[in-house]
Image (spheres, rainbow, N blue to C red):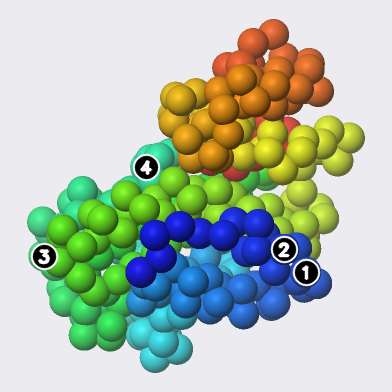
Amino acid sequence: MATTIDLDRFLAQLDATRERDDLQKVIVDLRNLLGVDHVIYHWVDSTGDQYGCGTYSKKWVAHYLEKKYLRVDPVIIGCFQRFHPVDWKRLDWSSKPAREFLADALVHGVGNQGYSVPIRGPAGQFALFTASHNSDDDTWEKIISYIGRDLILIAHFINRKALSFEPRRAGDASLTLSPREIDAMTLLAVGYSRAQVAETLSISEHTLRVYIESARFKLGAQNTTHAVARAIGCGLIVV
């Protein structure tokens, strides 16, 4: 289990990808880096086009599609209704279809624990980034306490990279933010305080304030809340 993630190393590998299919290798390497059983990235756009990559077995993916589990999967349903990261234990698994789905997923090695980050991008895009694992509740809680915040940033960067391979779905190219400005805006957008953002990015609150003010100026925003809204609306960050 990773206690910290070398984000710079991961982002360098991600930046080196040249086409969307290359994301599969990035996901596999990320799974190994995190020390969890599975990592998955899946997007659906407004036209119904889908793309996915991850470490679930091909047998499970085919079985999932055949059974049309998309309709009953509490992770999909729960994340579509939320904007913040979701621990699977906090989802509603009480219905018979949900319990049957969970039992089937466990047989196929999906993992009894999971943490999913819902992402909403430009032009109606919805994506989901998930880490899952087999462990007891205490162990999983420790894992997420170490890597949970990093997963939010990783989800964002993977989605931005995927969007870059689809130019017609990208955000407003006339506006750009630096990687650190994007990090700051993303974490603020999902509800972290300035102190939490500074801690996550390993910077001082003074340095964070510089990034926020720089982003606000570039976006022509009146305040931080307006800057976050503008960044989301322009497709510069996804939450």
* Rendered residue at 61%/73% (across/down): 26
Q: Earlier in the sequence, mark 3 or mark 1?
A: 1
Which amino acid type corresponds to the residue marked 2 in the rendered image? Ala
Label 4 element class: loop
- Distance of mark 1 from mark 4, alpha carbons? 33 Å
> Compared with residue 48, is residue 64 higher up or lower down, i.e. above or below?
below
Which amino acid type corresponds to the residue marked 3 in the rendered image? Lys
Q: Residue 161 appears at what percent x and percent y? A: 70, 59
The residue pinned by badge 3 equals 96
- Give the label, 2 or 1, closer to the camera: 2
Q: Residue 101 appears at what percent x and percent y? A: 22, 72
- Distance of mark 3 from mark 1, alpha carbons? 45 Å
- Distance of mark 3 from mark 4, alpha carbons? 20 Å
- Distance of mark 3 from mark 2, alpha carbons? 44 Å
Which amino acid type corresponds to the residue marked 1 in the rendered image? Ala
Q: Earlier in the sequence, mark 2 or mark 4?
A: 2
Left or right for 235, reference 50 = right
* Rendered residue at 39%/72% (across/down): 35
- Distance of mark 2 from mark 1, alpha carbons? 6 Å
Furthest residue in direction top, as rendered: 222
Left or right for 95, reference 41 = left
- The answer to whether the residue labelled 3 contacts the one labelled 4, judged by CB atoms less than 8 Å apart, is no
Query: Is residue 229 in view from this perspective?
Result: no
The residue pinned by badge 4 equals 81
The residue pinned by badge 2 equals 12
